[in-house]
Amino acid sequence: MKKIFISIITSAVLTLTSCSKDDGTTSETPAIIPPVAVVDPVTPQNVRTFMVDPNATDETVALFYNLRKLSQTKFAIGHQDAFAGFYTSSGDSDIKKTTGHDPALLGSDFMFITDKNNNGQASNWFFQQETNIIDDAKEAKSKGMINVFCWHLREPNNEDSFYAADITAAQQQTAFRSIMPGGAKHEWYKTKLDKVASIVSNMRDANNKLIPIIFRPFHEFDGSWFWWGSNYCAPDEYKAVFQFTVDYLKNTKNVHNLLYSFSPDNTYTTSSSYLNRYPGDAYVDVLGMDNYGDLNNQGTSGATNANNKLKYLSDLAISKKKIAALTETGYRVTNTTPAVPNWFSTYLYDAITNNGVQIGFVMFWANGNGGYYVPTPTTSNAADFNSFVIKPKSVLQNTLPNMYVLPN
């Protein structure tokens, strides 16, 4: 059965009718205009045709449909490495310690999993991280949460860093191009994708069902701090590698529990510039944006800038029948950088809700290394965060609907 949404008529056009009074004059009475019914073209029956992978598992299809539906009225709140316990002692997530409830999404990274030093041995630190990451993803799924993985892939020469500044100028100009089909490091890149495919294809929940994952390869590509940044490859080259990545995982490795996210930073100022390196609707399920700069203590003007950019991608996602998301954000508080009053409840909330913006989720970066993005109970901005999570459109794990079953 198709879902019917009633649009709100904000500026009604009134049809006037005349009737005679006893004195021969007329009065005008506005006619009642019925609400306009808008039919959502994406239904539980045809949703696969709007996805990158029409052969996705049932749970992955349900996640796409339900997250897109959620974005029409609310947004889910996520935290990178939520269960890692970096900032406080291990145990509950920092969001749960502060609010009483877990985040709705868990952010993870394939970085340690694909590291050259991961030898698969139980005594190996990198393999231990792989095990922890998998266990955390399973815990998140058991709680009904959503799993999102980024990938800080080490550069293909020495595999020591993902930062462009850590390699030579010559390597900066060749690293990304070398992993393209036909490139000198293309086979190396395929081995890394093989590892990702192996992990994802064996990540199962308590019911032995594959766990759906939103995958964000080569994020923040419009900057140049990563070796896949815009200074080191042309738009068509970036598109080619993104497309190869999706095709290889989906068609060659038969991975069918991934949704794919396109996640630039915040440098774009128009819809067309957002799409400059867009690989195409056939390769993207989630239209994202990472944005720290506009919300880096910039007050109302920064929130407005962030909102304008989210409006571009939100409108694009609506037109393309995709999901929009603020795939990374946060304001890092340290001993020398104090919290900004009302950063969560006013500036961020306005940025992600004003102007008709529809996003499926917002992801805060990980706590740790002497600072935090998500407050813990004793921090000065804990009350502000608690005000943010109880806003009408905010969703934590306790109010997240069942994301893994399609409605009838």
Image (tube, grey):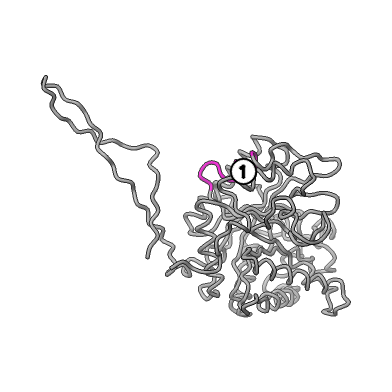
Q: Say whether residue 351 is magenta.
A: yes
User: Does 47 sit above or below residue 73?
Assistant: below
Circle 1 crowding by C-alpha within 10 Å: few under 14, some 14–19, many from 20: some
Q: Residue furthest right?
A: 123
Observer-nearest residue: 382 or 174?
Answer: 382
Residue 202 percent coordinates (x, y):
68, 79
Q: Is residue 51 left or right of residue 33?
A: right
Observer-nearest residue: 237 or 82?
Answer: 82
Across the whole image, how many numbered discs are drawn on residues? 1
Q: Say whether residue 95 is magenta.
A: no
Read off the residue under disc 1. 349
Question: What's the residue at 28%, 42% (across, down)?
Answer: 33
Q: Residue furthest front?
A: 100
Query: What's the residue type where badge 1 is placed?
Result: Tyr
Q: Which residues are magenta?
A: 346-357
User: Does 56 sit above or below residue 89?
Assistant: below
> Secondary structure of the magenta portion, mostly?
helix
Q: Using the rendered view, name the quadrant where residue 59 is placed.
A: bottom right
Q: Is residue 355 left or right of residue 370?
A: left
Judged from the image, the secondary structure of the residue bearing numbered disc 1 is helix
Observer-nearest residue: 219 or 369?
Answer: 369
The quadrant in which the N terminus is found is bottom left
Q: Is residue 370 left or right of residue 140?
A: right
The quadrant in which the C terminus is found is bottom left
